[in-house]
Amino acid sequence: MTELFEKSALPLSGIAQSGAANYPGLDSWRDLPISQQPTWQDKAVFDASVQELSMVPPLVFAGEVDVLRARLADAAQGKAFLLQGGDCAETFDAATADKISSRVKTILQMAVVLTYGAAMPVIKMGRMAGQFAKPRSSNDETRDGVTLPAYRGDIVNGYEFTPESRGHDAARMLRAYHTSASTLNLIRAFTQGGFADLRLVHQWNKGFTENPAHARYESLARDIDRAIKFMDSCGADFEALKRVEFFASHEALLLDYERALTRIDSRTGLPYDTSAHFLWIGERTRELDHAHVDFLSKVRNPIGVKLGPSTTGDDALRLIDKLDPEREPGRLTFITRMGAGNIREKLPALVEKVTASGAQVLWVTDPMHGNTVTSPNGYKTRNFDDVIDEVRGFFEVHQALGTVPGGLHVEMTGDDVAECLGGADPVDQEAFLDRYESVCDPRLNHMQSLEMAFLVAGALSKN
């Protein structure tokens, strides 16, 4: 094993083949402060991995990215709604057909409820096919007197608490690419090949609406059923309902990976990060003069930024100037993660300041990350009531200000896990012992996700 080294000091080995090496300013991030990056163990493995990533086919295409930008511009104007959901941290082992289809199905189910309840198009986006890197509050983890590097997601190291697993292995970036490619292949098959037929999605909802704990939602389910039957009896062309647009997104945390997958679009001559359609900057990496903001300011993808309760109006305006200087519709999304106790107090000033500036960003709520607690039996969890309260607060603020609540960003799964407490079909902490599966943050399970969709649909219809 070679000596450990810092990635920021590396030359641009392997990047030239990407076609983006000479684009003005694209690599200025390398000279800026950078946080939350691995310390790779082997320089030769790193160089070889970046070289290969710079030559592989793109995971998404520039034309798809442009379509998403147009859809998000509609959402910022209140003409559509963004639903973004998926795992906190994807793992290589969980990238199976059953688990991928279950997540996609749950997002499609939520979208049907939102579309019908709010009477507007829903943009469907997964935290999928690339959400393999996670920021950490500490570089190390100690168990029983043994200290090892913290788990930073499967793209960097393994979850197993051993020296071999926790080493930072750059070859994992290649496995992340190939796992993302296979995941996207399945997603495209599911959403374009009849799996997403609206009539089937309604059938999937039946198990939820027939549960006695969810009787209050039966009226909406009956309305959906009547509408579909009416359309069918009128000879509606259901071919158009068999396929849906589905976009991929992840936090752009590992800049070596993102840069290696950046390509120049042959139509426009502009750089696109082809690792995903949509990329976001986290609360821990959104410093204006640091590497993450600089790099993402140079690519054409729609960009999101997570904003916590410490964010000021001036912070938001400076981010707009850096990431969206042309004030391009659909370019910039602010994903607020305030916490249920802060949302009604902290969000209004931000929205007012941005609105007064004339910038038209898309406002999205992330009700998960500001509401994380530790259960009495030691599990990292979230109370479903707190999550719902932050969503309600988000809508209340925008309704009071006359602005657009444009989207929902949640960590969820299609499986029957027990990670978040509460819900109409309650999860208690004793269930964690058998059904807690997340390797990072707690997620809503299938039932909780659908319950969230019904509640948001009600808020949207009122708005």
Image (spheres, rainbow, N blue to C red):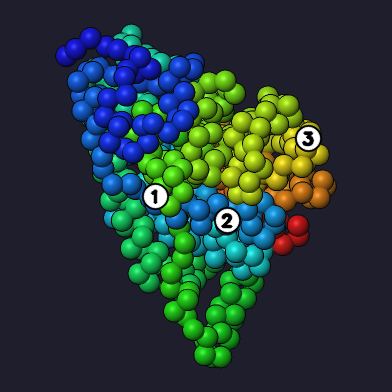
Mark pair 2, 1: CA separation: 20 Å
Element at label 1: loop
Mark 3, Cα crowd under 10 Å, few <14 / some 14-19 / many 20+, is some
Q: CA distance from mark 3 to mark 2?
A: 24 Å
Q: Which residue is mark 1?
A: 266
> For the view shown, which residue lies furthest in the left direction?
1
Going from the N terminus, do you reach mark 3 or mark 2 first?
Answer: 2
Image coordinates of residue 122 in percent, x first then y, are: 57, 60
Image quarter hosting the N terminus: top left
**Separation of disc 1 and disc 3 at Cα?**
38 Å
Q: Residue at x 34, y 48 (%)?
A: 59
Q: Look at the numbered disc 3 and give the secondary structure of its residue.
A: helix
Q: Which mark is residue 353?
A: 3
Q: Amino acid at mark 1?
A: Ser
Q: Nearer the viewer, mark 1 or mark 3?
A: 1
Residue drawn at x 32%, y 24% as measured from the top left:
12
Q: Is residue 204 visible?
A: no
Q: Quadrant of residue 194?
A: bottom left
Q: Is residue 400 left or right of residue 125?
A: right
Point out residue 243 in the picture as x, y percentages from the top left corner. Answer: 43, 69
Q: Quadrant of the C terminus?
A: bottom right
Total marks shown come to 3
345 relative position to 163: left or right = right
Query: For the point 26% across and 29% down, which residue is it?
Result: 14
Residue identified by numbered label 2: 70
| CB within 8 Å, label 2 to label 1 | no
With respect to residue 23, does 123 lie above or below? below
* Label 2 Cα crowd, 10 Å radius (few <14 / some 14-19 / many 20+): some
**Residue at horizontal 36 percent and vertical 60 percent from the top:** 188
Q: Nearer the viewer, mark 3 or mark 2?
A: 2
Q: Amino acid at mark 2?
A: Ala
- Secondary structure at badge 2 equals helix
